[in-house]
């Protein structure tokens, strides 16, 4: 999805440390929040949602747009859609021009059958990065899929 270099999958309870270029215990204070946040997203993308949430729980500052977005993603994928939406809305409040969180928020609204709210997020994404960006295409696809089903 992003241009980040490939990171190996670490065993449960560990996180990839970009500086050390190795897996370290997620309780290690040497691992910066940015690495923890990115690795939590990777865990979530791999379907390791509970591990992603546990890692996000170790952040020194859990209230960043990215961390809230990824927490929302993991909770939504665990079937806790309303909780996920709450995290997405907190993220949007911190960074209204963060296209990815708007995509995920829109997808959560699609899940809830609120295509009107999903459409609003699609308009916001369009104003951020146009209709050619991945976030716009992915959400437009999700809305179209819900409309045609």
Image: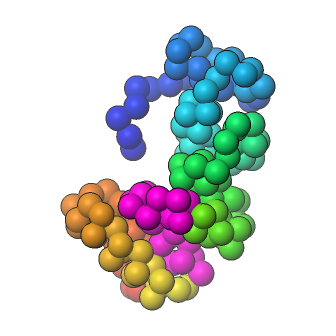
Relative side of 31 to 51, left or right: left
Q: Is residue 49 magenta?
A: no
Residue occupying the point 21% across, 61% down: 132
Q: Quadrant of the N terminus?
A: top left
> At which x and y percent is residue 116?
45, 88
Q: Nearer the viewer, residue 48 or 3?
A: 3
Is residue 96 covered in magenta? Answer: yes
The quadrant of the rendering that contains the C terminus is bottom left
Check the image and report above or below for 106 versus 34: below
Q: Is 126 in front, or is 12?
A: 126
Relative image position of residue 31 (x, y in whole percent): 64, 23
Q: Is residue 3 above or below residue 136?
A: above
Residue drawn 75% across the image and 37% down it: 58
Q: Quadrant of residue 136?
A: bottom left
> At x 61% / y 33%, what residue is drawn?
33
Residue 53 at x, y percent in the picture? 72, 46
Q: Is residue 34 visible?
A: yes
Give the residue drawn at x 61%, y 54%. 68
Could you tell whether 115 is left or right of 12 in the image? left
Magenta residues?
A: 91-112
Judged by its main secondary structure, the magenta piece is helix
Q: Does residue 137 appear in this view?
A: no
């Amino acid at each position: 999805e992003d241009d980040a270099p490939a990171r190996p999958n670490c065993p449960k309870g560990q996180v990839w440390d970009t500086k050390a270029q190795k897996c370290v215990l997620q309780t290690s204070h040497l691992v910066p929040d940015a690495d923890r946040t990115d690795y939590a997203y990777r865990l979530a993308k791999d379907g390791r949602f509970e591990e992603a949430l546990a890692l996000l729980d170790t952040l020194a500052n859990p209230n960043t747009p990215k961390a809230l977005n990824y927490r929302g993603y993991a909770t939504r994928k665990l079937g806790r859609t309303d909780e996920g939406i709450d995290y997405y809305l907190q993220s949007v409040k911190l960074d209204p021009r963060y296209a990815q969180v708007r995509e995920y928020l829109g997808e959560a609204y699609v899940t809830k059958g609120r295509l009107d709210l999903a459409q609003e997020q699609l308009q916001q994404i369009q104003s951020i990065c146009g209709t050619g960006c991945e976030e716009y295409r992915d959400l437009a696809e999700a809305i179209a899929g819900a409309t045609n089903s």
